[in-house]
Image: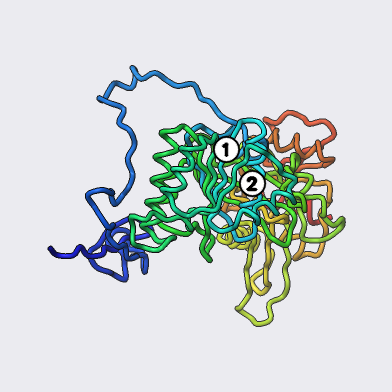
Amino acid sequence: MKKSQSIFVCTECGTESPKWFGRCPGCQAWNSLVEERPVKDRTEVSRSGFSLASSGQPVPLTEVRGGQEFRLGTGLGELDRVLGGGVVPGSLVLVGGEPGIGKSTLLLQVAGLWSTTRGRVLYVSGEESVEQIKLRADRLGIAADQLLVVTENSIPAIIAMADAVQPTLLILDSIQTAYCPDLTSAPGSVAQVRQATADLLRWGKSAQVPVWLIGHVTKAGSLAGPKVLEHMVDTVLSFEGDQAQFYRIIRATKNRFGSTNEIGVFEMRDTGLVEVNNPSQLFISQRAAGSTGSTVVATIEGTRPILVEIQALTARAGFAGTARRQSIGFDHGRVAILLAVLEKRAGLHLEDHDVYVNVAGGVRIAEPAADLGVALAIASSFRNLPINPRLCIIGEVGLSGEVRRVSRVEARLTEAAKLGFQEAIIPQANYHECKKIERLRLIGVENIGEALDYAVSR
């Protein structure tokens, strides 16, 4: 009998090939094909390993009985916000982030809180011994009889344990260390990660028990392993933050049961992660009064308005024609557009100046309502004129220099007034529609020139 040969699988799109190519024939990605060896016995194990119980014969959608949405709280309000209100029974959640960012700490805290209110939790670690887990639990103040910990890498053994102890929550740290004995490839390979995730998904759906997985990330910051891993799970949570800072941000990059726009903010302390209920105050608390190149913008993350500080610095370039443009927390391409608008529409000659933009606190801003704040911060640094520290700035900037309407402006202004801001620059289109906010003076502007005249020319 001819021995079955290895196949090559694309980590980006899942395309299979009988031989290796430098470029995937499916998605055209370079160096994405990884060797996947055949299973020991294909008659007993499916190579995909993925199957769920059939629902029977096809029926009209109108005859399907709609189930009432039911969610389980984790005990951490900020995490529940990101999940859409809590955990859906039987869901598979993947948590990714940089090494040392606090993924294991977060899930151990969730396990401790869950076990005290909802029953038994099985915490499986493939990287640490139970003694190491105990040390972390002591530091976090976790002592729960219903929290069961074990060190195990074999997926069949983990599922057997879960069947025996009947947990209400299963946590695996991490999916890259788990393996299926039926596959000959090493743990962390494309085949192993896909098979292990499929087996845990099948078990969680059938038992209606939430399963949480911790995932490693690559140098580029993306989740390690095949792209199909993110497609298989129900929710992908990204745990972000600067390890030199005290706060962490968790956001959903995929959520089948809720929004992907919400963020949760935590502060890292010696005793673990503490929820930050008012992130706006945290992000602007260290703002230096009277400094140039600093503005405060009101952005929307999901359903919550958040005020963040924009910092900009301009300095004359060392060599003509080699000016640098660098941004952290704000789209680099958007900064280039705003610089072009400032030069063309406002007369600021920045072609021979290095420009640096930073969103303080490690926050990433994606919405265009922060455009005007970024532009005024750059202008403030260039002209060396400070902006009123009690001025909040809201507005999208178009290519012709116009300041365009933004959504939910009243919620943004209410948050600004709550934190003691006295003035706010907003688009003229929003000015006529917006209700007056107590103790907050509104300045409507139609273009970037008007905003500069008011904020940076005094």
Image coordinates of residue 300 in percent, x first then y, are 64, 41
Judging by the rendered image, the residue that carries numbered circle 2 is 108
Q: x, y (%) of residue 314? A: 72, 68
Q: Residue at x 54, y 41 (%)?
A: 260
Label 1 and label 2: CA atoms lie apart by 17 Å
Please tell me which residue lies in front, 268 or 41.
Answer: 41
> Secondary structure beneath disc 1?
helix
Q: Position of residue 202 (x, y in %)?
A: 39, 40
| Nearer to the camera, 109 or 380 | 109
Amino acid type, label 2: Leu
216 horizontally vs 280: left or right: left
Q: Is residue 89 visible?
A: yes
Q: Residue at x 59, y 50 (%)?
A: 366
Q: Quadrant of the C terminus?
A: bottom right
The answer to whether one can see residue 429 in this image is: no
Which image quarter is the N terminus in? bottom left
- Sort mark 2 into few (<14), some (14-19) or many (20+) by Cα contacts within 10 Å: many
